[in-house]
Image: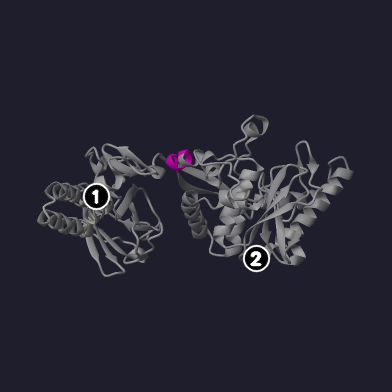
Amino acid sequence: MGPLKIISICMLLFLISPTNAFQIIYEIQEGNFSKCSGEAKYLLKVQVFTEENGVLKPKVDSIKPCDPVYWGRVFDAKNSILEYYFTTIPESGRLILEVEFSSGDRKVLEYQLGNQNNQSKANLSENQIYTFLMFETNYLVFFAGFVLSIALFLLRRKKLAVIVFLATIIFATYPEVASFYGVCPEKYKMINGTCVYALNLSPKNVEYEYCLYGTKKKLQFTVYGGLKEYLEEQPRSFVCRPRCPSDEEIRLKFINQPEQMIEIKKLVEEIRKIAQIRDEQARIAINLVQLIPYDYKKLNGSELKERYPYEVLYDRAGICGEKSMLLAAILKELGFGVVLLEYKDENHMAVGIKCPKEYANYIYNNTGYCFVETTVPSIVTDSSGEYIGVGKLRSMPKIYFISDGYSFNSVSSEFHDAKEFQRLKDLAQKNNNLLPSEEYMKWKKIVEKYCILE
């Protein structure tokens, strides 16, 4: 085989290799939002998949978003999701997405609003999602293939020139064919002839309860059945090659799973909207996870497959290890120092949040960590609970380091309340579970403050 044929074949392989697709995924949600002085009725979420950063400027038939915070915001090429709020969107209008890349390139993309079945916007149900993909023609492939085909023709390699030219037309003019070869890539599904991002399919709105200083409230959040299905297919075991991963590494893989962390970060943003003070955010996160029902059915059944943290959010159920990993993931994203506490003798897991040493239950690597129970509402630092079949926690836990970060410095309030709560429980135990009226009121005040289920 001569050098020219070798070069031609290599060039042909390059042409039929997947092109570097520029993709945009967007979704429009309809509802009543607090943005724009409470007047926002539509939320546009946009995700850009490309190799470089840039600025995205969306508008609908010359209507700009009413929330100026996101207008002209620089997007990160690595899976950042941008949100834009509108007070109005025409029933039949165009979505115009102007993209300016850091390299100086500029793209203007237009789409008619509405779904693949051309249903009217007025008939859309709240939070229904429509996802589209757009691709950039690979002009470099077209130019290289065109030059090569001419060169082959001049060298009287006419058949090969025709093959290269046809391949160039197919894979440069129709990059969706070049990228996917007619089959959607991983994490996408073919719906009505269009590849849609499967992890955002089957959305549902859920409410999570949380208690802060005795007041119960609810946090509304959207979870996706598509991501739940994707995580169910992810491995729960790990290959020992070249070495077996440590228990700590396995826990980190569960917590840091990238697709789920995109959604957990959204939950963290919702918590930040509720409370501006960081320690209050930790209190909300802790109680929110504690109030997710314990999965007694799984505890007493034969199902041994461990959930990923996002699956606990979706199912609104989990056992101690699953709920602890969910809380660890949330606290980590809130910026706190976090460890997991595994009590192997008692077959139990809890969370340790970084805190001042004088209030800490454990010292690890010269850092204090306060005990956080995740199965039921309880007071941070209170590790005196009893567990079915094992009683109290008496063994020293194995500690898995998850993240370094902020210290929960205001935990002194919980520390003193936990001490008082334990004193009152001990007093009641000595008196056939009875307390004098004054002591009972103290006990009731603590129970109500932390929404403890007694």
In the rendered image, is residue 90 in sight? yes
User: Which is nearer the eye, 287 or 335?
Assistant: 335
- Name the residue nearer the viewer: 166 or 6: 6
Q: Residue extending furthest front? A: 1
When the figure is inspected, residue 306 is found, relative to residue 371, above or below; the finding is: above
> Horizontal and vertical percent for residue 152?
15, 54
In this view, the mark in front (1 or 2): 1
Upstream in the sequence, badge 1 or badge 2?
1
Residue type at mark 2 is Ser
Task: Out of 310 and 148, give the one closest to the viewer.
Answer: 148
- The residue lying at 56 percent from left, 54 percent from top is 330
Q: Is residue 131 left or right of residue 278?
A: left
Question: Who's the residue at 69% across and 47% down the image?
Answer: 349
The residue segment tinted magenta is: 224-229
Question: Magenta: predominant secondary structure element?
Answer: helix
Query: Which of the numbered marks, if any, corresponds to residue 407?
Result: 2
- Report crowding for label 2: few under 14, some 14 to 19, many 20 or more residues within 10 A (C-alpha): many
Quadrant position of the C terminus in the picture: top right
Disc 1 marks which residue? 175
